[in-house]
Image: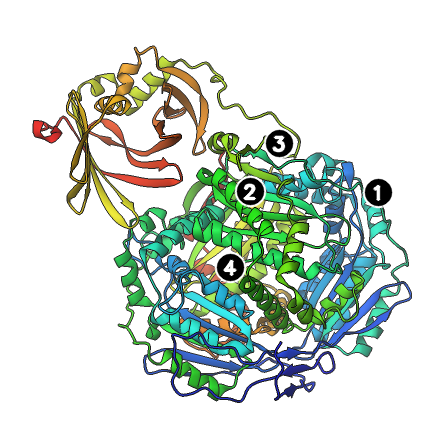
Amino acid sequence: MKKTILSLFFLATGISMTAQEVAFEEYDLDNGLHVILHQDNSAPVVTTSVMYHVGGKDREDGRTGFAHFFEHLLFEGTENIEKGKWFEIVSSRGGNNNANTSNDRTYYYETFPSNNLKLGLWLESERMLHPVIGQDGVDTQNEVVKEERRSSYDNRPYGNLLSAVTENLFKIHPYKDPNIGYMEDLDAATLEEFQAYFKKYYVPNNAVLVVAGDIEVEETKKMIQDYFGPIPSGEPVVRNFPEEAPISQTIRATYYDKNIQLPALINAYRTPGFGHKDAYVLNMISTYLSDGRSSKLYKKLVDDQKQALQVAAFNLEQEDYGIYLVFALPLGDTSLETLEQEIEEEIQALRTDLISEKEFQKLQNKFEADFISSNSSIQGIANSLARYHMLYGDTNLINSQIDIYRKITREDIQNVAIKYLMPQQKAVIEYLPEQNQ
Amino acid sequence: MKNIFALLLLFNLAIVSAQVDRTVMPEPGPSPEINLGSPKEFTLPNGLQVLVVEDAKLPRITLSLDIDNPPILEGDKAGVSTLTSNLLGQGSVNIPKDAFYEEVDFMGARLNIGISGAFATGLSKYSERIMELMAEAAISPNFTQEALELEKTKLKDNLKSSTKDVGFIATRVSSALAYGKKHPKGEFTTAETVDNVTLEDIKSFYSNRFVPANAYLIVSGDITFEEAREMAGKYFSKWKKASPLNLSYSTPKDVQYTQINFIDMPNAVQSEIRVQNLIDLKLGDKDYFPALLANYILGGGGDARLFQVLREEKGYTYGAYSGARPSKYGASLFRAQASVRNEVTDSAVVAFLDVINDFKNNPVSQKELDIAKAKYSGNFIMSLEDEERVAELALNIKQNELPANFYENYLEQINKVTVEDISDAAQRLLQPQNMRIVIAGKGSEVLEALEKMTYNGKKLPVKYFNAEGDPAEKPDYTAPPADNVSKKEILQKYIKAIGGTEKLQSISTMYASASTSIQGMTLDIEFKKGNGKYLMDTKMQGNSISKQVYDGEKGFTFAQGQKIEATGKAAEEMAKSAIIFPELKWLNDESVVVDRVDMVEGKQAYVLKVSDDNYSFYDTESGLKIKQESSTQMGPNTIKSTLLLSDYREVEGVKVPFSMQQNVGPQSFDLEVTEVKFNEDFQVSDFE
């Protein structure tokens, strides 16, 4: 540790807050890069992150998995960062970094002790300005991604469950394909195609930069201008994905997994994208059905009737369409048909009756409690700020999203169940052990 | 966080100049310095120690109860600990289960209890009730036969659900082998041991283990010390004073020589590798910090050596890591691990041993050490963002009998470590002469290479174990087919499946085009065969880059402008390639025999031995040919190559595989057939 002359004490002076307002400032650079700053000097930590509006769905037929592939490729080095040195640089300053890719966006971030703010900005600006995209890096990462696919999908029990759902819920929208892509597509892709993809999507006008934590705002703005200002902007990104026809007849499908012994039942529904108010209502329905031991499905199937080993409802929120899933593993000799009927009974009840006042109050309490805890780390705040700006178009949702939940009524819950969770709108997937051994 | 710790932040006022030179990596500002505070504490008369961290930043509270008991052997009742944990938190003798769950959920709180502690979090306006419910369920549990039966069924189903989980089995067996199955860290739960557990066992296990003697309650969040003291006194004082049993176990030993311990998992698409030896390392040891940094440099993350070699350099795996956890209760393990694709299992073992040996035998560079120090220092500083961390550190000091200033000196201790210290730590951590290399994988695809492999000129013995960690026979893939299917039946089934004898005999020539991609380049391949002739022409962007031709008498290879005549075996192979449906001939060829039944990509297949180094595989269900295997001598090495056939489609009444995957050594190419035509007239010039 270096000794320095100037020192400053930060004493948190016991200010008690009831709501954790996340203060932030946002603006655009001339090249279109959106910048969000959040200052919190209570701990010597800073996160620098860039979210690009590019994900698994940004592809052409026969060239799937590019965005995820770039998640790997953009650690290979830049004109000023030698190949293979990225992780070493981050570690050598005591930082952590990672990236993740969804169907809709890719997120790269570093968290450092706050004396390395400038390094974080340099790294992300290097990545945006001039990464080296060469055959060498493509070949290495192609092998790594294949191993990732084996580890995360093919050698893992229930690893292909989501693929089984998406290929049934989507016929023409890119959500039909796995985010990681098909290996033959990556094998067939040429270096020129990768370079063109970078040029199209990884441009300042398709990205948001977040700097959060122990910073001084004016000084930070200047550094951002220095490092990101000179990056040229790209063409506007235009998306025109085909719309899926509504599902009007129950889809039934079977999928075999050689890594499992217990079958699973999945009921899946296609729901609206996450900007839509109904998506919030569906989150509440998930909580109602399976969050906590007093939730409807857990209590009924696991505790009272002893028919399920596990049951869970999720709303997988995505930009164009959500996926609503109810997943259950049978206990003992319970058949998947029985599970399906029992689950349908509860969803039917949602459609025919209002949930009780008490259940409704419980839901509100749970969402309030989760909201209080949702912004507790700098890294988490940075991610939320980027997400709310880029995908929801309103950065301040980090503070106001709870109001949307507060406004949801029991009637909304019933209406959404009627609108999206009808039996003829679902895909029923029997996910079975492959017996053949 | 008023008086918990004061944060001393130092920063530099020298502002950057206007222009940045992005070719130079920015220098860090002065390091932020930290001063750790400590939580406030008190002890209840029953022995429960309470640590309080006041943090009013958010209106919430977290309760964490930690019961620090020595490990215990569960023996033929293995699972009693899990079952007891699962039965805890289901209400209490005073509050029925449903009402209990309902109330916890209604407050929007989370509450979990297990045999080694409890955790709860919720809004601070419910602090008192949350603590009351936690204490109630923890101290006055209601164990019933009905609930036990349900938990037993669930646990057995859970066990069943992991029987094909390759990674799970690899880890379970590697622990069983390292410690022995009669050791708390080596034993594991099975359906039989679960069946042995009675309600009495649960009750006595609970009363012997769930005691306040070594228990710590951390209260953190929007609560004052006085409030916490009053509440804990009110709800936890009725917990009866008692101490847990402390038993000792035999000390496990490493194997006498490095060996492979193999578990056959026919469903595996990757081999799960664990390379391990025993270590004795405690948090308070003098070389704890060197050991921590040594493991980090070897396998602690994305910039460590194992990851760099096995993933970034060789592309064998998605990630390779190592760990060396300290343990205050006797031995623990150094363990390096990765999941690698089947074809490179043996190469990955070599890579692991190379990296480990090199690490032990040669000093690390000062740069590597500096990076490791920076990483640990930075992570330590950043972890203090979480207020509860202060209490965790204080707890570590108590539970491991560390000096009170252990964490205050943490950064200094890290900084003091030298390259020599790392070498000493490597000697202590790594025993490459006495390692177990535990591999769970698909024997039929990986064993041959593992059995043959040598390291430093010595064979690595392979010992076999089953998924329970007991010695097993070497899997026998050469066993005769169970139902004694004859060669004739296999071939006839295949011929029928693809179109029937009559149809096949009517075909005199076959044309096929296919494409593949190698390193981003697309290659187009054209095949022509029939009337005793054969052509394989490989083109890139329309230009032929290599050709194999058999004109009916002689075979040639054209490449890079040269024409080379094939001789010997290569010529024979080319002549054979001219035959469109060799199976028609094999019916009357005595040298083709049934070899065995094997698995191909999860499917059972009959294997015909065509010659000493050529085998054909036929799906036992569909009858279709799904794989060909051949080996070729190249200098001193035998190169095995396999061709997987799939996506059969009908063309003019004949079924043809449209998808092929060629594997040669660690390389793999996918061929997609684009067009097939039969009985086209070929030009004689095609074969010149």
Mark closest to the chain's N terminus, 3 or 1? 1
Q: Position of residue A259 (x, y in %)?
A: 52, 40
Amino acid marked by disc 2: Ile
Alpha-carbon span between mark 2 and mark 1: 40 Å
Residue pictured at 26% horizontal, 72% vertical:
A235
Label 4 or label 3, whichever lies nearer to me, is 4
Residue B463 in the image: above or below residue B561: above
Q: Who comes first in sequence, dot 4 or dot 3?
A: 4
Secondary structure category for the residue under label 4: loop
Q: Chain of mark 1?
A: B
Helix, strand or loop at disc 1? helix
C-alpha gap between disc 3 and disc 1: 35 Å
Q: CA distance from mark 2 to mark 4?
A: 20 Å
Residue at 48 percent of width and 81 percent of height: A37
Q: Quadrant of the N terminus of chain A?
A: bottom right
SS for dot 2? strand
Number of marks in the rendered image:
4
Label 3, secondary structure: give it. strand
Q: Quadrant of residue B58?
A: bottom right
Q: Label 1: how many residues lie within 10 Å, few (<14), some (14-19) or many (20+)? A: few
Whole-percent x, y for residue A427 in the image: 43, 49
Classify mark 2: residues with Cα within 10 Å, few (<14), some (14-19) or many (20+).
many
Pinpoint the chain carrying mark 3.
B
Give the amino acid type for the residue marked by disc 4 in the picture.
Asp
**Separation of marks 4 and 3 at Cα, in angstroms:** 34 Å
Amino acid at the residue labelled 3: Phe
Question: Which residue is tagged 2?
Answer: B273
Q: Residues within 10 Å of mark 3 (few under 14, many from 20)?
A: many
Closer to the camera in the image, B119 or B412:
B412
Q: Earlier in the sequence, mark 2 or mark 1?
A: 1
The residue identified by callout 4 is B303
For marks 2 and 4, the one nearer the N-term is: 2
